[in-house]
Image (cartoon, rainbow, N blue to C red):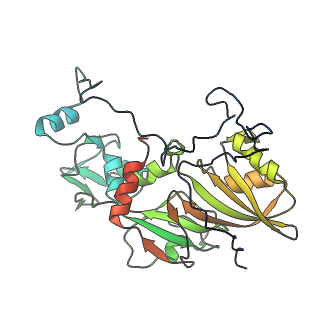
Amino acid sequence: MEPPKKSGPPRRAGPGGPKRPSGAGAPGRKADGKPRSGKPGDGTTGPSASAKPWGRKPGFKKPGAGAKTPANPHPARAAATSDGKGEPQRIAKLLARAGVASRREVERMIEEGRVTLNGVAVETPATLLASLHGVAVDGVAIAAPPPARLFLFHKPTGFLTTERDPAGRPTIYDKLPADLPRVMPIGRLDMTTEGLLLLTTDGGFKRQMELPSTGVPRTYRARAFGEVSQQQLEDLFDGIEIEGVRYGPIEANLERRTGRNQWIEMTLTEGKNREVRRVLEHLGLQVNRLIRTSYGPFLLGDLPPGAVQEIRQHDLVQFKASLKDSK
């Protein structure tokens, strides 16, 4: 069964995450539709309509303002400064960005003695390097990381978002084209959840996108059995606590009813484990279909199930430049 099409112009994935519903009767507004007064950050007023995409940019600072030079810098930092190289980073991060493996997998490789620097085994993933020059994994030299690549994948239901499964269940890697480079999923979708899954060759970009502090919104459409009111959904904008777990603001709207099934659209920025399902179950609903339709500005659109589409390098560079600084 295909999801029902909405009437009117298509809704774009708005930047900055959930927006509080406006108009009379909406949470945080008086009966006449005017916003209630409240202290900043108390949840009584929504984000400004004039807010720029992905939140405010870092404030302007004069060149050199606040810059400090440590009295005893790390040897790698001192060497990089004298050679005019970039800021040193942890070897695990550099290898992840080079597409060798995820940062966690790289740390395991280092523990197993599989990573060497100038022929000597690296002892800690915290080793600072300005480049991957002289680094090898399993005896194979690692070249400088190529530019990050990003792919849209329409994950079908019935596939795990993992590289391998001990139980032998099918994973997304069983479905991906054989000519695709080594990619890592940005976040996860449950086995029974379908829709947009982002895949990248850059471990650092993957981590940045997954951090709640980056604030990238994800939009889902859920078909759920049961009864719920629009007011109950709007109350989710203030956040909710379920069994000791606090979930942040969620923008939720009731699209339509079909018998006792409801189609609900939800936009959130945290992406905690099974967040959409847990929240709707808390409201007394039983989710029987869940589709992710967007992640940031990237839309599922008409991409067929199982298909992959690469984002143009220009668009990816522009998007990465717009992200909040969340190292």
Which residue of the protein is positioned furthest toward the left in this rendering? 83
**Where does the image place residue 108, in percent across and percent down from the top left?**
41, 51
| Residue 36: quadrant of the picture | top right
**Where does the image place residue 42, in percent across and percent down from the top left?**
67, 30
Which residue of the protein is positioned furthest toward the top in this rendering? 71
Quadrant where the C terminus lies? top left
The answer to whether residue 107 shows anywhere in this view is: no
Q: How many marks?
A: 0
| Residue 93 vertical placement versus 37 (above, below) | below
Left or right of 97 on screen, residue 277: right
Q: Nearer the viewer, residue 229 or 135?
A: 229
**Where does the image place residue 240, in percent across and percent down from the top left?**
73, 41
Q: Nearer the viewer, residue 42 or 167?
A: 42
Q: Residue at x 21, y 36 (%)?
A: 76
Left or right of 236 on screen, residue 228: right
Quadrant where the N terminus lies? bottom right
Which residue of the protein is positioned furthest toward the front in this rendering? 32
| Residue 301: quadrant of the picture | bottom right
Q: Residue at x 28, y 46 (%)?
A: 122
Q: Residue at x 61, y 63 (%)?
A: 11
Q: Nearer the viewer, residue 9 or 106?
A: 9
The answer to whether residue 89 shows anywhere in this view is: yes
Q: Nearer the viewer, residue 4 or 75?
A: 4
| Residue 36 vertical placement versus 205 (above, below) | above
| Residue 191: quadrant of the picture | bottom right
